[in-house]
Amino acid sequence: MPWDIVVKNWSFLAAGLWATIEIFVVSMIAGTVLGVLMGVLRTSRVFLIQITTRAFIEVFRGLPTLITMFFVYFAVPMLFQIEIPSFLAAVIGLTLWELSEIAEIMRGAIQSIPKGQVEAGRAMALNKAQVLIYILMPQAVRRMLPPLIGVYTRLVKGTALASLVGVNDLVMAGKIVVERTLEPLEVYVFIMAVFFIINYPLSVLSRKLERKLI
Amino acid sequence: METMIRLENVHKTFGSLQVLNGINMEVKKGEVVVVIGPSGCGKSTQLRCINGLENIDAGRIMVKDIDITSGKVDWQVVRQKVGMVFQSYNLYPHLNVMRNLILSPMKVQKKTKKEATEYAEILLDRVGLLDKRDAYPGQLSGGQQQRIAIVRALMMQPEVMLFDEVTSALDPELINEVLNVMIDLAKSGMTMMVVTHEMGFAKAVANKIVFMSNGVVAEEGPPEEFFANPKDERLKSFLSKVLH
Ligand SMILES: Nc1ncnc2c1ncn2[C@@H]1O[C@H](COP(=O)(O)OP(=O)(O)OP(=O)(O)O)[C@@H](O)[C@H]1O
Ligand SMILES: [Mg+2]
């Protein structure tokens, strides 16, 4: 078996890998920040905020990410007469899914904290924002860390969808190399190895945290 | 003597459940008022209304000269005057003892870390827990946690302290270490309103005992008279149960 194909096509595959990593990192950061915000809003006592955030979360958690991505890439440009580059479409599609997952985790984490914690904070004269920042969030973050890492590993897998809206990511680069060389075995083993190498440490970390936090 | 807390005809319902049904009560400066009554008669609710954890439906509550039921009250100001200790301690589990104590003084009263820490050390020493300053709540016994919770409330230098069955969750052998802190506090002149089943505590330090039943004050008086000569029928049967 010609195991040197990866080496020969390294710069091409590396460019694809780089694009995959970029998509992952950008979506991860955007989804985390927006998801935490959305999760906090989701616990609001204001009915209108509660219901809109809930609707948003239910929709984007339920949709296949690929459909969201296609909608952003193909349908939104027609609706608004704008152009959305494939990289951006991929990031938006993944972020919408991820932020909904994280918002739900955040909500669960906040609501799992005993009511007495909020009452103690209020009785100690803290205002609402201070209770959230100093009492609820630190405890919520601890609880949400393992499931959060679970979302990240699913996000890594989800990046493979980006090739379907035309991003030259690792999957696309691999496909092109296979078409050129007709050697799928080595190329796909390489791609599998890359995904494993990214995700394995995450799942180890998640398990470690789970043990430490329980 | 100056009035610290006054409840005037206070009503409170939860849905269709009438919990407080016209409470009238007064706590003067330096007084220790013990509130007793059967489970579900509204003792906790009454305390929670005094620092705004619950809103009342009708009546008036005064904390010193502030009408806290006026609708435009600054709770951060009121809650610095009124400390509260809960049955379940409610220490912040992610912060160590010292950080539990200095959080509000720093964030609300804008004390420096040094000032707050020094004051915390004085109070910790007073309750015999200075060596636990770096421990986390989960590493402490219930009695220790509750003493820390009392210190946490005292950190704000309140003028009144509310205690809601603070020894009820404790193993019997840990109850006295908490009661002793409360007795010291009472002797130091702190104004206290204490919901408890500890009749020994009531006899030792209470200036006044209030018996609540069905959301009203059914009987009140100084401890000697109250225990020796109860008049209300419900109080008589209640006392026969708790005094064995
Ligand atoms: N947030 C709430 N929502 C609905 N009902 C409540 C709420 N809080 C208290 N109640 C009800 O109000 C009544 C009085 O409760 P409260 O806790 O004040 O009683 P208590 O005198 O402190 O009793 P205990 O001795 O058991 O602590 C109870 O019937 C209780 O179930
Ligand atoms: Mg109670």
Image (cartoon, helix red, strand yellow):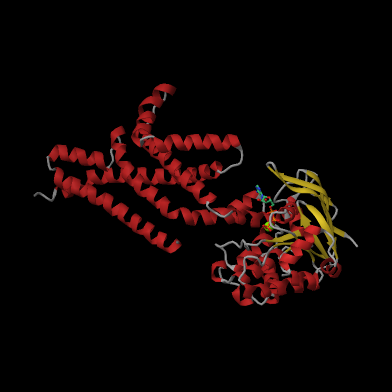
Q: Quadrant of the C terminus of chain A?
A: bottom left
Q: Residue at coordinates 16% horizontally, 40% vertically from top-left?
A: A178
From what the image shows, is residue B115 above or below residue A198?
A: below
Could you tell me residue A124's position as x and y percent?
68, 58
- The foreground one among A194 and B182 is B182
Q: Residue at coordinates 31% horizontally, 52% vertically from top-left?
A: A199
Could you tell me residue B144's position as x and y percent?
62, 72
Q: Residue at coordinates 77% horizontally, 56% vertically from top-left?
A: B212
From what the image shows, is residue B100 above or below residue A112?
A: below
- The foreground one among A199 and B221 is B221
Residue A64 picture quarter: top left
Tell which quarter ligand 2 is in. Answer: bottom right
Q: Residue at coordinates 57% horizontally, 64% vertically from top-left?
A: B95
From what the image shows, is residue A13 above or below residue B178?
A: above
Could you tell me residue B58's position as x and y percent?
79, 43
Residue B231 placement, left or right of A11: right
